[in-house]
Amino acid sequence: MAHDLFEAARDAMQFAHAPYSKFPVGAAIRADDGKIYTGANIENLSFPQGWCAEPTAIGCMIMGGGKKIIEMAVIAEKLALCPPCGGCRQKISEFASASTKIYLCDEVGVQKTMTMDELLPLSFKTDILG
Ligand SMILES: O=c1ccn([C@H]2C[C@H](O)[C@@H](CO)O2)c(=O)[nH]1
Ligand SMILES: [Zn+2]
């Protein structure tokens, strides 16, 4: 089942706009509506203005009507594995649960499976904000 997510993330990586880092990344989300939403990193000449593949996929999910991340795959062209960066872990957690699976992929397929809680332990939670 995760293999289709791997393929979607790998295909999404082709759309990366990464002329500065030359480090294309792809991400794919299976959402609660049953659809797969994908994203790639989109860099900018003003370096801090670029963003990661994961928030591109999250934005596509939200605008497509998905509300929750059921599982997610991430792949980078030039790394054995690409664990989501710290900022992405927080962004993913907004739409995930502790047991949501995140698949770290290489060019062959899924190489490591982690839960949201393993990626972002002791995450910020409050009931003050609802
Ligand atoms: O979780 C991550 C970490 C990095 N990148 C991108 C950002 C930048 O464009 C390139 C090099 O850091 O990789 C992602 O897309 N996701
Ligand atoms: Zn990131």
Image (cartoon, rainbow, N blue to C red):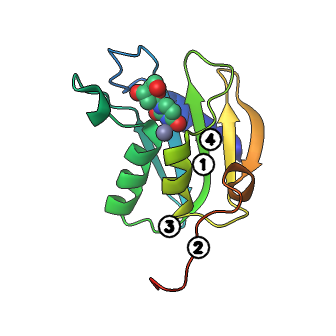
* Residue on which the image places disc 1: 72
Q: Name the amino acid type tagged 1.
A: Met
Asked whether, in this view, residue 89 is left or right of residue 101, the answer is left
Foreground mark, 1 or 4, reads 1
* Residue on which the image places disc 2: 125
Decide which of tag 2 and tag 4 comes sooner along the chain.
Answer: 4
- Distance in Å between CA atoms under marks 3 and 2: 25 Å
- Label 4 crowding class (10 Å Cα cut-off): few <14, some 14-19, many 20+? some
Q: Nearer the viewer, residue 30 or 50?
A: 50
Q: Nearer the viewer, residue 125 or 70?
A: 125
Foreground mark, 1 or 2, reads 2
Residue 94 lies, with reference to residue 51, above or below; the image says below
Q: Name the amino acid type tagged 4.
A: Asp
Q: Nearer the viewer, residue 51 or 24?
A: 51
Residue 80 lies, with reference to residue 90, above or below; the image says above
- Distance in Å between CA atoms under marks 1 and 2: 22 Å
x, y percentage for residue 86? 55, 44
Q: Is residue 126 visible?
A: yes
Decide which of tag 3 and tag 2 comes sooner along the chain.
Answer: 3
Kindly identify the residue that appears in the image at 58 percent across and 30 percent down. Answer: 75
- Distance in Å between CA atoms under marks 1 and 3: 14 Å
Q: Name the amino acid type tagged 3.
A: Asp
Decide which of tag 4 and tag 3 comes sooner along the chain.
Answer: 4
- Asked whether the residues under the numbered discs 1 and 2 touch, taking CB atoms below 8 Å apart as contact, a structural biologist would say no
Foreground mark, 1 or 3, reads 1
